[in-house]
Every structure is written in structure tokens, then in C-alpha cells.
Amino acid sequence: MTKLIYGLVDMQSFYASCEVASREEYAARRKEFDDSTDPPLVVSGDPARRSGIILAATPTAKRYGVENAMRLGEALRLYPRLIVVRPHMAFYLHVSVRIQMLMQQCFPFQEQFSVDEGFIAFPYPSNLFPDPIAAARNLQARIWDQFRIRARIGLAPNKWLAKMANKAAKKTPGGIVWWREEDIPSVLHPLPVEEMWGLKRRAEVLRRKFKCETIGDVARLPVGVLKAEFGVWGEVIHRWANGIDVSDINPDSYHAPHKGFSHRTTLPRDFYERSEIAVVILELLDEVCHRLRQAHQAGRRVGLGLTYEGLTGGFYRARTLPRATNDPAELYPVLLALLDEHWDGSGVRAVSVAVDMLQFRETLQLSLFENVPARTRLYETVDEIRARFGETSIMRAVSLTRAGQLRERSLRIGGHYA
């Protein structure tokens, strides 16, 4: 019986690999199956000021203890001879699109999962794909030949298992792992419960409250017990622990309707003053509301996230409004209330703002006390000016203060310099 085999294709240290592959002095000596032929290179913030965090590191750099999300200064203390380059996001996105297009050429089903990951699926057994390992190796070789980037591929009966198999492929010589249904008890169930992809803090609850040390322990829990603890997530956890996932490949995943809009920025220093944090919140909210207006949508729930100094700790809290809006004047006071209620005074290094519970905005919600049509025309005019002349062609006065981040962010893609 022919079934689909799913694969998760992951690009090793993607940003760092793009940089190394594009530099003649390093590219010639690199070998596909020998990580040690990479230089000790990291992609990080501003090398001149030793600021920022590590976005990606080659395997050679990681051997010195360097890790993603580590502060650049700490990484340089571990290995002062690190090669540090600033991120070039436009280049990485260009390479990402080309790799995803290559995956589409090789397999009948493909779904982009992130900038450096993508799902594939193909029928097996079939005349086109008589050997799944060989099919995966062909894609892996073509990615290396065209882009000089190493790919690891996990194959399995469904998408979730493919993600888990991919984690195993990262530790396997050759970088390809194929898990079959009959392999689940031997390859999945012995893994620590923390290895379950997608659980995050729920894994801590499973270990602490239910004494689950392995994924097999979770699989043996009654589904009713899991649902009582985690709600609808309990059934998902039960399926995953038993190697079951019903989600399909979605080739249009990046074009699906938005469930919400959010924007996040990492600050150049720790912010301790409420007034400074409030400026950043307002700038992020303006961006989110601009995207809402472009999509002709409004949201009923607004959320604020803060990450504290050292990029550790923080919170995310949201509040539901009586009606949907995309007006920053209505949403900003709610965000400030969330800030005052949940911020403990710690230094803030990253801020995020989100609006969800969306609906299409076909009509204006009028008010007896405010000139809503005039304010709507104002925002439409601002959007038009920015579309024609750039994001910083018109801005709030607070963006010109020391706390303002808009001018700096306008030079970046995805939070990093293009």
C-alpha cells in the first residue's frame, strides 16, 4: 500500500553557513561531511562594539562553547579568535527562497516551515521514489552543490515525527534518518520527555507532576488524564507521544490568512525607565496597526511581552477588548496598563507587541466623543506617505528621543541589517 513519507529539511547553522559559503577564503576548503573544515565564524550584532547576541555559529565555533543567543562579548571571552560578521538578512532570505524552490523541484509536496527549514512529502513505495534515503540524499547533495550548505533530513510517517527524526539526523553521520511506524517504540519512546518537540514548559509539568521521564511514559498516560491537565493540548500530547500527527503539508502556509500580527525588537541596551519602554511599545504598536490596516483587519486582543536583561526571564500578557480595533490610540493605554501591572522593574532587553482575535474591518465603529472618520483619514494619509517615501518619512516626535528605535529598525530586515 502506497503511503506518504514526510521529511523535515533543516539547514545547518543557516546564517553562518551562508556567510562561510559566500567567502572565497573559506569556501574552497570546506567539505560536505566534515564540519571541522568550517572556520570559527559567528553572525552577531555589531562586531566593532562587541555588542549583540550570537544569531548563528559554525560547528567549529560551537566546539569552543559558543552557543546561539549567547552575548557576543561572552563568546569572545571563550574564544578571542572568533570571526565575527554582521548579519545580512536580505542575502539569507534570498538563499532561503532558492532552497525552497529547489525542494519544490525535487518533491511533489513542499511546505516552508521557517527561513531555514521546510517540509517535504512523497509517495512510497512508488516508481519515482523507490528508495526514500536515496531521494533525501539527492536533495541533500543538490543543496550542497548549489549553495554549499549542509542539510539534515528527518523522514517519518508524519510531520511531527519528521521533526523528531530531524533532531536525530543532526547527530547522525550523513545527516539523514528515516523512522518507520514500527520503529516508534525503539526510537521515540526511550527519548527524555524534554525532547518532545512543541511542548516547551508542558514537559516540566509532565516530569514533575506525572513522573514521566521518557516519551514512552507520556504515551502510557490515559488521554483523559492529559486532557484534565492541559485541556485540548492533552489530546495533542497523547497523539504525539504515540507517534500520531494528522496535519498535512500546506504548500500555501506562508500565504495563509493571518491569525494575528506581532512585532518584536531587541534593544541595544537594557532599558530601566518606564518612559523609555513606553516609547518602544508605541513604535511597535504603530507597526502592528499599520499591518492590520493594510490587511483591512482589526483585533480584539492585545498583548505585551518583555524579555529582561541577559535575554532571560520576562513575561507575556494579553487583554481582550470589548470590540475589535486597529487604532493605536485605543490599544496603547491597554499596553501601558499591562506594563504597569506585570513589569517588575528589571532591565528590559526586548519588547514585543501583538494583536490577535482578528476580524475584517468592513465598517467604522463610530463614537459620540471622538471624530473617528477624521482619525481614520489621518492614519490612511500616514500609511500613504510611508509607502511612497519610506518608513521614517513621517514619525512620532518620541522616535527622535534617545529611546526611539524606529530610525535604526528601518535599516534592518527581520531585526537585522540587510
Image (cartoon, rainbow, N blue to C red):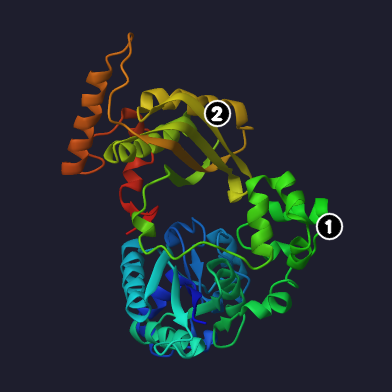
Q: Position of residue 184 (x, y in %)?
A: 68, 75
In this rendering, which labeled residue sits more in front, label 1 or label 2? 1
| Residue 150 shows in this picture | no
Q: Secondary structure at mark 1?
A: loop
- In which quarter of the view is residue 85 placed? bottom left
Residue placed most toward the observer, 77 or 257: 257
Vertical comparison of 160 with 333: above or below: below
Instruction: Tell me the kind of residue under disc 1.
Output: Lys
The circle on residue 338 is 2
The part of the image, by quadrant, that contains residue 242 is: bottom right
Label 1, label 2: how far apart the Cα atoms are: 35 Å
Estimate the x, y position of residue 311 in percent, counting from the top left. 58, 50
Q: Position of residue 300 (x, y in %)?
A: 45, 30
Q: Earlier in the sequence, mark 1 or mark 2?
A: 1
Residues marked 1 and 2 touching at CB (< 8 Å)? no
Image coordinates of residue 62 in percent, x first then y, are 58, 73
Kindly tell me whether residue 205 is visible in this rendering.
yes
- Disc 2 element: helix
Q: Residue at x 53, y 74 (%)?
A: 81
Q: Quadrant of the C terminus?
A: bottom left
Which kind of residue does numbered mark 2 sit on? Leu
Label 2: how many Cα within 10 Å (few below 14, some 14–19, many 20+): some
